[in-house]
Amino acid sequence: EPEVTQTPSHQVTQMGQEVILRCVPISNHLYFYWYRQILGQKVEFLVSFYNNEISEKSEIFDDQFSVERPDGSNFTLKIRSTKLEDSAMYFCASSELGQGDTEAFFGQGTRLTVV
Amino acid sequence: KNEVEQSPQNLTAQEGEFITINCSYSVGISALHWLQQHPGGGIVSLFMLSSGKKKHGRLIATINIQEKHSSLHITASHPRDSAVYICAAHGSRLTFGEGTQLTVNP
């Protein structure tokens, strides 16, 4: 069964460092998403991406965040200068159509720890 | 007030019991998702529905658009059903509920 894969599963980084979280969405999917979940809190939407551009972003997704689809398969989330409060589980998801129209498939997540 | 509210927050059941988890939302939606989050953190999509009822194995999801309410039912619950169940409403974006921690004891 096709699945969304995320790497790494766990990343520890020093405050102020840049991190890149990687995702390989399902191959025929057109819509890609990043979510995050701070420990003990609910999942929050970060950004959606379609047709090589951001289609929507939340208030959380400020200038320190960026997304890219550098080739035909990877979808990345970059955090430029990490802060302690960026520590969270980051989930990538993809869907064939928009999430109001088709089911989204989630990756297993990357646990980011900023020290 | 949260746009998506779930109840209960925590639920403990004995194996075999019928489980109901409720979700109310205040936003206009095009679809509602039920998700399962395992202890390791991974998220699995269970259902996406915009009307009526869907069934998959022992899981049943219903939605009442007029009342802005959805329920997830688990029949003949089993310890392996223990997880966090999350509803997420799709308006302009996915808005998640806080989740319901379900524990099914043998």
Image (cartoon, coloured by chain):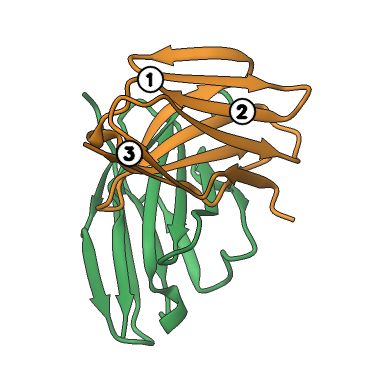
Residue A9 percent coordinates (x, y):
21, 58
Q: Residues within 10 Å of mark 1 (few under 14, many from 20)?
A: some
The chain carrying label 1 is: B
Say which chain is orange. Answer: B
Circle 1 sits on which residue?
A: B75
- What element does badge 3 sit on? loop
Residue A40 as seen in the image, left or right of residue A98? left
Residue A65 percent coordinates (x, y):
49, 67
Circle 3 sits on which residue?
A: A25
- What element does badge 2 sit on? strand
Determine which quarter of the picture holds residue B46.
Answer: top left
Residue B62 percent coordinates (x, y):
57, 19
Label 1 amino acid? Thr
Q: Colour of chain A?
A: green
Q: Which mark is residue B70?
A: 2
- Please determine whether, in this image, residue A5 is positioned above or below residue A76: above
Give the mark toward the camera: 2 or 3: 2
- Please determine whether, in this image, residue A22 is positioned above or below residue B60: below
Q: Earlier in the sequence, mark 2 or mark 1?
A: 2
**A39 or A23: which is nearer to us?**
A39
- Which corner quadrant holds the N terminus of chain B? bottom right
Determine which quarter of the picture holds residue B44.
Answer: top left
- What's the distance in space between the residues labelled 3 and 1, CA to CA? 32 Å
